[in-house]
Image (cartoon, rainbow, N blue to C red):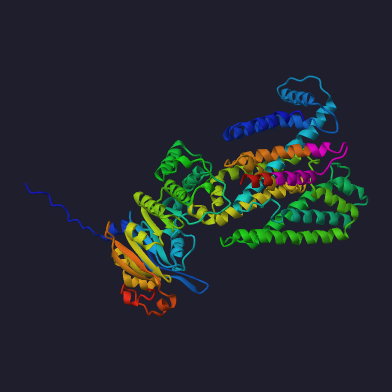
Amino acid sequence: MKDTNPSLFKLLLGRILTPLTRQQWFILGLVILALITPIAAASFGAASIGFLDVLHIVIRKLSHIFGRADEVNVMAERIVMELRLPRILLAFVAGAGLSLAGSVLQTVTRNPLADPYLFGISSGASFGAVVMLTIFTGSGLFENPELIASSGVFSGSGAFAGLLWFSLPFGAFIGASLSVLIVLALSGLGLNSQVERMLLSGVATSFMFGALTSLLLYFASPLATASVLFWSLGSFAKASWSLLLLPSLVIGVSLVIILGMKRQIMALQAGDETAHTLGVNVPKLRLNMLLLCSLITAVLVATCGGIGFVGLMIPHTVRLLFPGRQSILLIALVGGLFMVWIDVLARCLLGNQELPVGIITAAIGSFFFLIILRRRKVAI
Amino acid sequence: MKPFPLPPIKPSTPHAVEHNTALNVSHLSWVIDGKTILSDINFALPSGQMLGLIGPNGAGKSSLLRCIYRFVRPTQGTITLFNQNIDLLSPKAFACRVAVVQQDTPHYFDMTTEQLVSMGLTPHKGMFDTNSSGDSVKIAKALEKVGLVHKVHQQYERLSGGEKQRALIARAIVQQPQLLILDEPTNHLDVRYQIQILELVRSLGISVIASIHDLNLASALCDSLLLLDKGEVCAMGTPTEVLTEARIGDVFGVCAQVSSHPQHKKPLISYFYGYQHQDVDQGILMPNHDLSTFKGS
């Protein structure tokens, strides 16, 4: 990992310097990391393509647009351009989106444990996915159960696999939307204990869909169960340029909206009543933000499965690393970079087999979180 | 040459009076679940004056203030702000006219003093507006006014009680309101800050309505007082008119003597100690300073 060394060095150097400059060093390190990440992350994977080769391919591709081209390994170019780069971008978008949603939800509910999956979104999505799977396996569309298992990864063999490949995210999106609608219907527009109602109805919805999912899986075939499990742990393996379009669009637009509403969201931190006296329509803002975060999460769950802990952890980490600097962009950047490198780990840890991303985020995330929490306890 | 006859000046045309009224509350009632919290409240606050809201715990002081800053919707009655019905204003327009300083802020609160004060700009800003240099000057001036320039970059949570209260007032100054509402601004403060905060608020020259527990403080620093008891207006007027021994005894259930303050000649209240509650409740002890009824001695 030659590329993370400069930022690590700066991190250590920053310790010696004063608090203000330490923050600036952090940001400088982040920017450098963000610049080299697309190329560096693309040089990891099953096929060995070096950092310079990737750089060469990307520069060649760029110069190709301007009419100049020279010889390059076609295979390596296809791997980089059609598999690795979209995957890296999808990981970045997913990480940024989840951290963004987590940060906004933590602020508008004033609950440090709020996370994009808190409102039953992921259980709703799992339920939708399982319903789709059982419909397809139950109706005998799948004579060959191997197709189900392989459809979790991009294989594209056969029309039925293609059908499932589309219907699984579709079902997940419907399920996620359904759970959000239930939560919204229960939390209502009134100011009175809106946050409590949101959280409680979210937990209830989550359990309800969890139970329904378990029921369906109990009667489903083992292979369908395995497929759902793999899907629910999250993966960027299906990434392609066309798949990247919708998440990028949703998260880009959401980011702009959140940046526009930043003052109002910040005012909510000081309590509902204070925000009200600062001219914020509190119930409406909170509902709109929940809706927006749900949209982000539903789109991401449908595209890359359930990736837990990022939305909870990244905002807290940024808050602890950059105290007082409540930058939405910074949270999105850190979340995106974190996810890209987690995905690199997922690709490389087990030699010729991929690990689901959700396992690594949860494992690293909880460990990291405990350390930060300990440090915070010491600091106060 | 004959001087041109000047039109007679009418000092109190209805229009002029209404124009100078910052806040007018009429027939305000708030009933929740069959329980009357406020009933038929009527009063007007002249522009530029400071009104003190006094009354025992549970009298409805905070509820009245919440009705005025629209956090709760009264069952009936109208509130006008500079002759405009407040129900017709948008949340943003209302926040540009009325600023509120509350008692408590949430515990989980990660902000520097400067960030907190700059929150006062919220209602004045559109979607993507950034802070201009004029805004920075505004924030700096507000911080200077409340004497917190040296605490600009400190975490708000680490400020002392008095400093927190002053920071909140600085936020209200940045909000540039026509009316400032303070809900028990002197709570938990030592006597120096109690005086300092209220004098600071007075010096702003805007209309102020503040609920205050300390009757002597209210007497000394408010232009007029509104005495609430069980959701009803008990008395309204200058401190001298409102703060009589009989009223203090009736409403607060204490025995007090009212004299004239040596400095400002407004009422100065001295309390007598040692009375048992049931005596007061049964009305055996009439509130006067006749020491023959003073059982504690």
The answer to whether residue A85 is seen in the rendering is yes
Q: Which residue occupies 76% across, 20% down?
A: A69
Where is B21 relative to A144, above or below? below
User: Does residue A366 belong to the magenta stretch?
Assistant: yes
Q: Position of residue A259 (x, y in %)?
A: 58, 43
Q: Position of residue B60 (x, y in %)?
A: 44, 67
* Residue B23 visible in rendering: no
In the picture, measured across the screen, residue B165 lies left or right of residue A134, that is left
Q: Residue A321: where, in percent of width, then height?
A: 63, 40
Give the magenta range: A344-371
The answer to which of B205 and A178 lies nearer the viewer is B205
Determine whether, in the image, residue A242 is placed left or right of residue B8.
right
Position of the N terminus of chain A by quadrant: top right
Q: Residue furthest front?
A: B297
The residue drawn where x is 82% and y is 30% is A78
Question: As drawn, is B173 to the left or to the right of A301?
Answer: left
Secondary structure predominantly adopted by residues drawn in magenta: helix
Q: Position of residue A26 (x, y in %)?
A: 64, 34
